[in-house]
Image: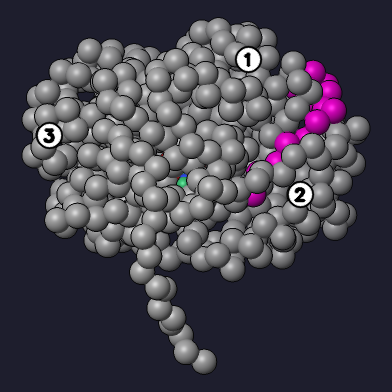
Amino acid sequence: MQNTVSEPAREIPVRGEFDVIVAGAGLGGLAAALAAARTGAKTLLVERNSFAGGVATAGLCCSIFNCYFTGKGELGTTGIPVEVADALAAAEGYGQAWRRHKGHVIYDVERAKWVFDDMLDKAGVQVLYNAVTAGVVKQDGGVRGIVVETKSGREAVRARVVVDSTGDADVAALADAPLRSCRTGLHSLCFRLGNVDVDAFVGFFRKHPEQYPELMDVHWTLDEALAQYDDCGTFLFPHGGGMQMDAFRRAKADGVLPERIGTHDTTDACQMHAIRRLGVVHVITGFVHFDGLDADRITRSLVDGRRMVFTVADAYRKYVPGFEKAAVIEVAPNLGVRVSRHLDGDFVFTAAMMAAGTRQPDAVGRAVGWDSKTLHKGEKAWGCQVCRDDSFDLPYRCLVPKTIDGLLMGAGRSICTDNPWLLRVMVHTMVVGQAAGTAAAVAARSGVPPRAVDVQAVQAELRRQGVELG
Ligand SMILES: Cc1cc2nc3c(=O)[nH]c(=O)nc-3n(C[C@H](O)[C@H](O)[C@H](O)COP(=O)(O)OP(=O)(O)OC[C@H]3O[C@@H](n4cnc5c(N)ncnc54)[C@H](O)[C@@H]3O)c2cc1C
């Protein structure tokens, strides 16, 4: 069998022209599009799903890791990441109360889709859903637009600058930019259980505090978790905690919760995000390990994952207090891919720079990193994320591809780093997105390629948007 075929070249219609196109509407793309539009650019946001949010909605991962604050309790990130947390918290009814706690900011994913639409509308971003970015328009060695596949057919859209917020660096790959791949990623299929008596679940830990996995995954105690619950109505049961709780140990011993279901392993890890108002608990459990760009293995993990979800839900009903009448109400439409492909650029942002809080001359964002420290005494103890005392600077250079012009990376996990895990969490990807969107708009306005943009002008614009750069 022949391994390749030729696609015939053809003329396609041009759907429109923009200053900035953002491909991918995860939290990185959302921040990029908002920032570009607020800088005055005519902006288009293109998304393959029928709503924005990416992993934060389609992946059913409904919790922003609260690394907003340094270990000293100072706000280490400003701008759109804070605005998004405030908007989600306000929609959930607890306003800015999340700022009093260091636990994850937990929100309702359905409302989040609407909150994001509203923010995009108000900023004047034009949005195109159900649109896959399937190609790039190249001219003089630079990216000058993208090709989209929609129900209307295959069309081109021109832009002065394209921001790649697909998370998988799809646009950069289509443009033949140099990239690095993660052959073995770590992915999860998340789900939601409804009809949960959340007060009973939380009440169980009030009576049996030794069953709560303090200092697993997050740097906090049961008292802190309960304080957040009483204040915000949201409760975090940390990742890996299932391996420390008797209920899950019993379910495993009885053979009701297998350690492995198809391609998914560690089905007892069980991170849970509970929302009292809805009687809903989001669950992240089960890991699959493969190159997150392998279409066949993604499909297999979705099929196995749905079987895993219903098996795990049976175990919850039988063993976990408060879940006696729980039902699966949603399995994530998308597999949650943590890392896949990222830029091989001129400038490599390193873990050492992040740890040292190195000040960067071309800083276009500031955020808080953490150290993973094993503080839990349990048998299968995981490291917990201990936020550092100082924030770090995001350098502009690590968003810029080596050889291709007209393109910027706008998602945390796909910039040029020595470790794609460094900036993958929600706060960090929004910092990267806001920086990329602002720089793209400034470059478009000045008529220069992103590589030649005046970084001081970008910094001035970010400050105008409320970003503190020091
Ligand atoms: C299982 C899991 C649990 C996590 N837990 C946490 C947590 O508790 N707290 C936390 O802060 N972070 C967590 N993270 C990390 C965080 O959720 C994500 O890294 C972050 O939301 C990623 O946002 P993003 O915009 O960079 O990428 P994505 O959310 O992946 O967004 C990319 C967007 O681009 C779209 N897209 C992709 N390709 C194309 C294309 N070719 N054409 C058009 N559109 C395209 C996608 O549909 C998607 O909407 C978790 C991640 C996973 C996977």
Q: Is residue 199 shown in magenta?
A: yes
Q: What is the distance, in whole Å, between disc 1 and disc 2 at their CAs?
A: 26 Å
In front of the other: 76 or 35: 35
Q: Is residue 454 in view?
A: yes
Q: What is the distance, in whole Å, between disc 2 and disc 3 at their CAs?
A: 51 Å
In front of the other: 362 or 29: 29
According to the picture, the residue beneath numbered tag 2 turns out to be 309
Image quadrant of residue 453? top left
Eyeballing the image, is 387 above or below 461? Answer: below
Give the secondary structure at mark 3. loop
Image quadrant of residue 278? top right
Looking at the rendered image, the quarter that the C terminus falls into is: top left
Numbered disc in front, either 1 or 2: 1
Eyeballing the image, is 408 above or below 440? Answer: below
Q: Where is residue 458 in the image (x, y as percent from the top left)?
A: 16, 25
Lower position in the chain sequence, tag 1 or tag 2: 1
* Mark 1: amino acid: Glu
Residue displayed at 68% across by 14% down:
233
In front of the other: 451 or 418: 451
Give the secondary structure at mark 1. helix
According to the picture, the residue beneath numbered tag 3 turns out to be 447
Q: Position of residue 431 (x, y in %)?
A: 33, 29
Other residues around mark 1 within 10 Å, as few (<14) / some (14–19) / many (≥20):
some
Residue range in magenta is 188-204
Quick check: 404 left or right of 54?
Answer: left
Quick check: 215 left or right of 444?
Answer: right
Quick check: 446 left or right of 98?
Answer: left
Numbered disc in front, either 2 or 3: 3
Lower position in the chain sequence, tag 3 or tag 1: 1
According to the picture, the residue beneath numbered tag 1 turns out to be 92
Residue displayed at 60% across by 9% down:
94
Numbered disc in front, either 3 or 1: 3
